[in-house]
Image (tube, rainbow, N blue to C red):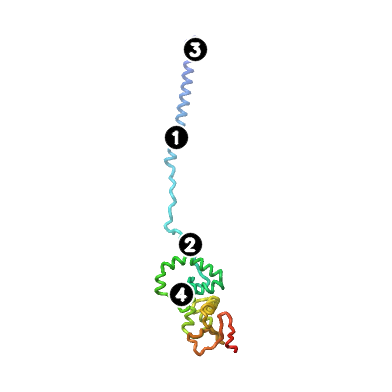
Amino acid sequence: MTTTQANATATTKANASARRKSTRTAATKDTATTQTTKQAATKKTAPKKEAPKKDPNLTVSEEKPEEKFQSMCGFEYDPAPASSCNQTCSKDNPDAYKACLDNFEKNGSAKAKKVATKKKATRGKNVWGHLNGCQGALIDDVFLNGGAHTLEEIMKAAGATRARTLSHLKHLVDVWKVDLRITEDKKYFITGYGSEGLEGKKTNGVKVIEDASEEK
C-alpha cells in the first residue's frame, strides 16, 4: 500500500469515527430534549389540585352550651345573712350549700350588681327577712296568708322538695322563733297568722317539740 492510499484510508476512518461521535451526540441531545419536552408537557397537563368544595347543606356545629347550674332546691342562692340558705341549708346540707355559694361567687355576684337597683325596687324582703319570690319566701307566703296546710300543700305552693320544705320550717323556728304547730290531721300553721280556732302541738317541722307549759 502506497503512502497516499494509507493516508486516504486513515482519513476515511477518522471521518467515519467523527460521524459516529456526531451521531451519538445528536442522539443524546435528542433524548435529553425529548425528556425535557415530556416533563414540560407533564407539568402543563397535570391537573391542579383544587381545594375541597364546602357543602352548602352542611352547617357549622355550634359550641356546646355551658350547662346551667342547678341548685338542690331549684332556686337561686339568697345571700341575705338571715336567709334559709345561710342559716339552715348551710348546716343541714353543707355540700349543696357550698355548691350554691361557689356558683354565686363565680356568676351570681356580678349578675346581682347589674340588677341590684331593680331588685331593691321590685322585690324587697318579707317579715322573716327572705327575698320576695325566692323559695323560702314562697313557703313563708303559705303561712302569712293564714290557715293550716299539709306538707304536700306547702311543697306544691313553693315548688319545693320535702327535704327543702322541712328544712325551711326548721329555719323559721330556730332563727325567727315562730310558733309553728301541727294539728292532729298533720296540718301546719303558725300562731298569730290566721290561726284563730286552730289547735296543735309545737313542732320545728321535723319533730314535735314537747311544750312544758302544756304538760302542767
Q: For mark 3, give the secondary structure.
A: helix
Q: Label 2 to label 4, Cα distance in Å?
A: 33 Å
Q: Amino acid at mark 4?
A: Leu
Comparing labels 1 and 2, the label whose residue is closer to the camera: 2
Q: Position of residue 94 (x, y in %)?
A: 56, 70
Comparing labels 2 and 4, the label whose residue is closer to the camera: 4
Q: Earlier in the sequence, mark 2 or mark 4?
A: 2
Q: Amino acid at mark 3?
A: Ala
Q: Nearer the viewer, residue 38 or 177?
A: 177
Name the quadrant of the C terminus: bottom right
Q: Earlier in the sequence, mark 1 or mark 4?
A: 1
Q: Amino acid at mark 2?
A: Lys
Write down the residue under mark 2.
64
Q: Amino acid at mark 1?
A: Thr
Q: Label 1 to label 4, Cα distance in Å?
A: 88 Å
Q: Earlier in the sequence, mark 1 or mark 3?
A: 3
